[in-house]
Image (tube, rainbow, N blue to C red):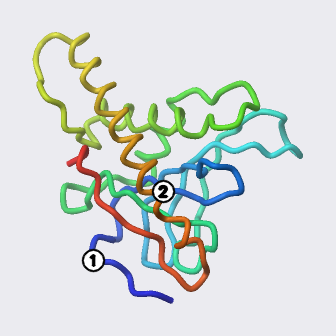
Amino acid sequence: MSDIPETFSVGSLYIAGFTQAAKEPHKALIIPTDTQSGFLVHIRIDRETSPNWTYQSRKQRIAGEMFLSSLLKIHDIAAGEITVDQLRQAATAVPVPDNDQFGECGPWLFKVIHQLHKSRLVTMQTERRGSDEAQDEHHIAIVLGKLAQEFKDLAEGSRAFARRERFPNVAVSQFCL
């Protein structure tokens, strides 16, 4: 197993990228409980239970997980704990897409991050904060777009990390505090 990067911290919140045959990685949110595993929320399609996307929360292996290739830290534990229950509440507050179209995990995930921001659990760097709620929402949408691109760039450079003997590629977002 490769060394665990200094940027990795137990209890922080990450966007997790799972390499798959498709061009885009599957996306989820994970809070590591130790260096070996963590608690994950995501949406997925399980044709045995539903033809459409469904919400799932579960324990997830980190070290030695062949498909987990990238982790982008969006909240550091040093800024305060986000509990599993708080993550679940934010995730279940966002409707799951009622379709089976490829790629819905990303838009859903960024809506969950927006929900975490509105709940003051994740802090996104916005250019301004004021009393105009519509303008603030516009700035948050811009930052979420930049965060999505930042994750896409990280994931594209992380395919080589999708191996059992490699710890996922870890980075810290420049758009979240």
**Which residue does the numbered mark 2 point to in the structure image?**
155
Q: Earlier in the sequence, mark 2 or mark 1?
A: 1
Q: Residue at x 30, y 30 (%)?
A: 118
Q: Which structural element holds mark 2?
A: helix
**Residue 128 versus residue 79 in the image, above or below:** above
Which residue is more in the foreground, 108 or 145?
145
**Which residue does the numbered mark 1 point to in the structure image?**
6
| Residue 24 appears left or right of 136 | right
| Residue 24 appears left or right of 124 | right
**Residue 173: x, y in percent?**
29, 52
| Residue 34 appears left or right of 51 | left
Give the Cα distance between marks 2 and 1: 19 Å
Q: Residue at x 28, y 59 (%)?
A: 172
Q: Which structural element holds mark 1?
A: loop
Q: Residue at x 43, y 60 (%)?
A: 31
Q: Amino acid at mark 2?
A: Ala
The crowding category of the residue bearing disc 1, from other C-alpha atoms within 10 Å (few below 14, some 14 to 19, many at least 20), is few
